[in-house]
Image (tube, grey):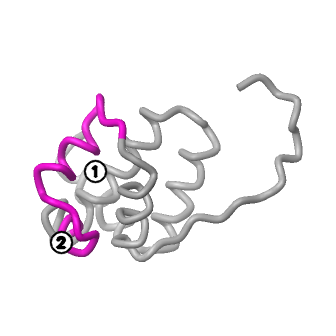
């Protein structure tokens, strides 16, 4: 991503409403790598970056980087700590198309 595009992208992802919508769309995809990429993008966009998010989430910085890597596989407890560290929360809805293939 070009520097100016990246800066604009990061600026938008600092908005909690934009970040929530972005992550919700990634969750809709249902692909763990897409979800982790979205979380990583949101984390990197924060003023204090992944290091600050690690502190707010009460997780180690190295653990945070590992968890948000392409091969990351966070525990649910770590995932929820990150979500809360971003000032977001998870919500469950009824699937209006419950018979689609996973």
Q: In the picture, residue 47 is in which quadrant? A: bottom left
Residue sitting at x 18%, y 47%: 65
Camera-side mark, 2 or 1: 2
Q: In the picture, residue 56 is in which quadrant? A: bottom left
55 drawn magenta: yes
Characterize the local packing of mark 2: few (<14), some (14-19) or many (20 or more) Cα atoms within 10 angstroms.
Answer: some
Can you identify the residue that label 2 sits on? 55
Numbered disc total = 2
Residue sitting at x 53%, y 70%: 89
> In this view of the protein, which residue sits in the foreground, 32 or 59?
59
Q: Which residues are magenta?
A: 53-73
Question: Which residue of the protein is positioned furthest toward the top in this rendering?
Answer: 101
Q: Tell me where residue 77 appears, x and y as whole percent.
A: 41, 58
SS class, disc 1: helix
- Disc ID at residue 5: 1
Image quadrant where one finds the C terminus: top right
Q: Tell me where residue 64 appears, x and y as whole percent.
A: 21, 52
Residue sitting at x 48%, y 72%: 88
> In this view of the protein, which residue sits in the foreground, 8 or 48?
48
Sequence-wise, the earlier of marks 2 and 1 is 1
In the image, 4: left or right of 77? Answer: left
Characterize the local packing of mark 1: few (<14), some (14-19) or many (20 or more) Cα atoms within 10 angstroms.
Answer: few
Q: In the picture, residue 101 is in which quadrant? A: top right
């Amino acid at each position: 991503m070009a520097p100016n595009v990246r800066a604009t992208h990061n600026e938008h992802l600092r908005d909690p409403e934009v970040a929530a919508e972005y992550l919700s769309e990634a969750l809709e995809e249902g692909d763990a790598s897409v979800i982790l990429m979205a979380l990583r993008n949101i984390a990197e966009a924060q003023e204090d970056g992944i290091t600050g998010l690690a502190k707010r989430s009460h997780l180690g910085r190295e653990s945070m980087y590992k968890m948000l890597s392409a091969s990351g596989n966070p525990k649910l407890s770590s995932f929820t700590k990150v979500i809360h560290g971003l000032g977001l929360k998870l919500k469950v809805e009824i699937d209006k198309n419950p018979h689609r293939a996973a």
